[in-house]
Image: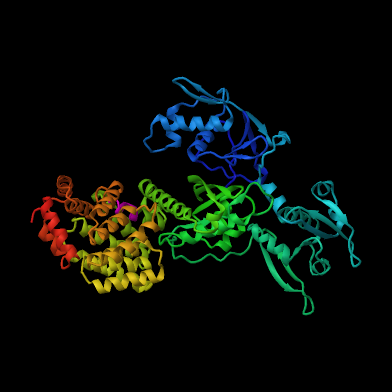
Amino acid sequence: MFNLRYKSEKADPGELLCVSADDVRVERISLGETIYVPEHDQLYQIGGAPVYLRAQSSKVLQYLAQRLGLLVTREELISHVWRGLAVTDDSLTQCISDLRRALGDKERKVLRTLPKRGFVLNGEVIPADQMTVEASVPVVQLDDLVQQRSPEVIASIVNWKGVQSPEFQSQAALVSSGSSQMSVKQIRFPSVPQAVATCRQWASKHGAIIALTLPGEPFDELLSATQSGEILVSVEVRELAQHHPVLSFEDLGHFNEQSLSRAFRLAPDGSDLVIEPDFKGQPLLPAVAVLPLQNIQGNEPDVLGTVFADLVSGTLSAAEEINVISRLSTAAFSRGKPNMADVGRFLKAEFVLSGFFIRRDDRMQLNLEFAEVLSRRMLWSYRLDVSISDLLGEFEAAYEIVAKIRRAILINEIRRASIKPLGDLQNYSLMLAAVGLMHRLSPHEFSKARKLLDVLADRAPNHPAPLAWTARWHLLRVVQGWSDDPAKDAQAALGCTGRALDADPENVLALACEGHVLTNLTHRFDEAEDRYNLALENNPSDPNARALRGMLLAFQDRGEEGVRDTELALRLSPLDPHRFFYLAMAAGAWFTPGDFEKAEQYAKASLRLNRTHLSTLRMLAVAQQKSGKHQAARGTVAELMRLQPGLRVNSWLKSSPSADFRTGRLFAQALREAGVPD
């Protein structure tokens, strides 16, 4: 979770204000029988126990607290909390009731209702330095985390006379008086960053010789190897500094052949020579960093926060359109609250998932934030309650979290592409926006998607991902009935996938797209199945290849096998931006074994997400016809013919991959009976 400065005046709640440790002021608000901590967006009882709220109720409280003592209208609350959604006043009324229960506000004095006007939250802001013991709340600032969660560090200093001053006495405590070999003073610091910050000033200003060690470690050899103005640290201190990426060191190795000690020299300016990877231009895929969650109730890092990050990172790694920063790299941000600038500088991430958790008995409340690093925009916040056994077992919520991440990135890049000139966009903005617009299946947006792909092709001509998506574009153009020359589009699509696989023969997306083209446009089923099988060998959790293979099997009257694949694809894509596609494939798979009710159910679910997918409309019509719902089938066909007026059963049979199988013949007959002309 990032440092958020609480502001009682009006502010954009979506804006992240990243501040340094010296600039953080955590305030608390006394609300009736509870204390609200804006920085953590968490409500506590006076004794310190957390009060759990539903996600929407928490958002209402957060918004009201930002406008403490001010009138907030119903319309303003609904617009903020349910942004872009159509809800009734009942939803807000329920949240207000939840809040009053949580606040113990039976007399409605804390959260007042002004009839026909709105609500006012009354409370008292309590600065951190005025918090009483009785009203203790586990509030954690960045400095608190550094001090409490890091072992103490001992600075052994030669040339004490030159660096003695009142400021040093105020920052550290004298604990011993040295060594038999030299005049040494030792000062105890509560953390590596504090020791480095102070000692760096002493070394540069006074030429002091300084060694940093943990309590009990020998320091004589370090001091004997140190030059004037240098700071050497032990290997143990260097390992602690891994959690503070702004600190960099040079490995000096062992002192001599007999010594077991090893030394590291602190870089004078706190920076190291960084070799940037050569992307040959802008990176093609956005990088996401999943940071370990902070336990705001404890003084030590909690392994559960790391377990969460491992699970989400592993699940997210299956997404073809995203790069995931390694967990060993994000571990450097496991202590304290990361700054956006540091995440971008050291992890090279464009997006970051962070947050904290509150543990109670065998359950955890997870408080998550997903943000864009460069703009510091929070794209979503999410709160959920899980059992620890679920986290350590089958953590199903990981799929939901990953789906929210993928959807947020996709929507963010479509928005960016709509408001910025093409020349200013990152390559991944171009690709993700093109993919999103393509699958909306609107002729105008479909055409715009191709323009984006063409610009990307100029920037990254041999990368497999944009080539694979261009192949998918040609395929969808044929399937939607927008192609003037299907054979030409088929050849163009295979040309794209061929180039993609020349660049990366095991690229899962390119293999799946080529299998899709071979299935739908050239009817080379054995080759298509080989492509799907190879894609799934490389990534068994890829829902795209899984659903496409299931549909291929269904085309060939292998319905039970097809159902297994398409159902697994649905399980792997619970909130996928293109879930309509997986539902459509599943509907087709259920049609083959004759479960027309299930096929209808899935087709309707697909159309609720995308009304213009012609394959789904055809599937719904035949499922309704085979279920005996003839009037409904004719209504669906009327909608289908409106979108595809040139559709004919015979022309469909000529192009359909299932035309030579029982499934295709049943499908064609049902289309005729439902009203599609021959």
Classify residue 551 by image quadrant: bottom left
Residue extent of the magenta highlight: 434-440
User: Is 43 or 238 nearer to us in this picture?
Assistant: 43
Asked if residue 555 is positioned above or below residue 429 in the image, the reply reads below
Residue 538 position within the rendered picture, expressed as x and y whole percent measured from the top left:
40, 70
Q: In this view of the protein, can residue 10 be seen by the observer? A: no
Asked if residue 558 is positioned above or below residue 418 in the image, the reply reads below
Residue 34 position within the rendered picture, expressed as x and y whole percent measured from the top left:
62, 33
Classify residue 554 by image quadrant: bottom left
Residue 15 position within the rendered picture, expressed as x and y whole percent measured from the top left:
51, 41
Residue, x 26% and y 52% (percent of image)?
603
Q: In this view of the protein, can residue 166 be seen by the observer? A: yes
Asked if the magenta segment contains residue 438, the reply would be yes
Classify residue 261 by image quadrant: bottom right
Residue, x 30% and y 68% (percent of image)?
497
User: Is 595 or 403 nearer to us in this picture?
Assistant: 595
| Residue most extreme to the top | 115
Name the quarter where the C terminus is drawn: bottom left
User: Is 284 or 603 nearer to us in this picture?
Assistant: 603
User: Is 589 or 82 nearer to us in this picture?
Assistant: 589
Residue, x 19% and y 55% (percent of image)?
482
Asked if the magenta segment contains residue 595, the reply would be no
Left or right: residue 334 compared with residue 204: left
Left or right: residue 439 compared with residue 308: left
Main secondary-structure element of the magenta-colored stretch? helix
Count of marks placed on residues: 0
Residue 354 position within the rendered picture, expressed as x and y whole percent measured from the top left:
55, 51
| Residue most extreme to the left | 678
| Residue most extreme to the bottom | 257
